[in-house]
Amino acid sequence: MGCINVERSCWVVLRERTGKGGEEEQRLLFERLEDDRRSLVGSNYYFIRVLDAMPSLCRIPARGNDCREEVLDHENHGISDFELEDAIRTMTGDRCLDGWYQMSGHIERKIRVLLEFE
């Protein structure tokens, strides 16, 4: 796992899905993200993933075969821990997938506003 410094001094961790399990997880994740119009912001899909019992804001490129998942510093994007936890609490049924959750409309709006000013 490597780290790179991108977008306004936000450190991100890249998680790469490899092997059979990773490919299947990637396919299921893309299917769910494509069905959720909120998840596509700019050229990336955004979602919440629970990593080490902590919710994290993540994104993956919407196009291409890039399987790298970026774990963003959500506080640098103006999103609090409470907002991530609240989005998880409101997700039900088929909108949840093994530690993956769709972001709320509130988080989506914050990301869209931030991207407008980049």
Image: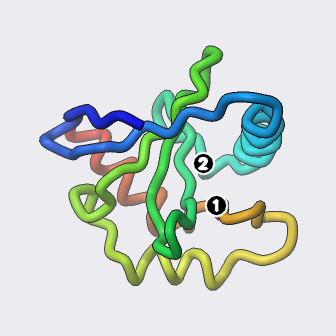
Asked whether, in this view, residue 52 is left or right of residue 94, the answer is: left
Which amino acid type is shown beneath numbered disc 2? Ser
Mark 2: few, some, or many residues within 10 Å (few <14, many ≥20)? many
Neighbor class of circle 1 (other Cα within 10 Å; few <14, some 14-19, many 20+) is many
Q: Residue at x 78, y 48 (%)?
A: 32
Whether residue 116 sits left or right of residue 51 in the image: it is left
Hey, which quadrant is residue 74 in on the image? bottom left
Q: Residue at x 50, y 80 (%)?
A: 85
**Which part of the image, by quadrant, shows the C terminus?**
top left
Quadrant for the N terminus in the image: top left
Residue type at mark 1 is Gln
Q: Which residue is drawn at 55% across and 33% down?
A: 16
Of mark 1 and mark 2, the one earlier in the sequence is: 2
Q: Where is residue 95 in the image (x, y as percent from the top left)?
A: 78, 64
**Residue for badge 1:** 102
Mark 1: which secondary structure? loop
Relative vertical location of residue 63 with respect to residue 56 in this rendering, above or below: above
* Residue occupying the far top of the picture: 64
Q: Residue 39 carries which label?
A: 2
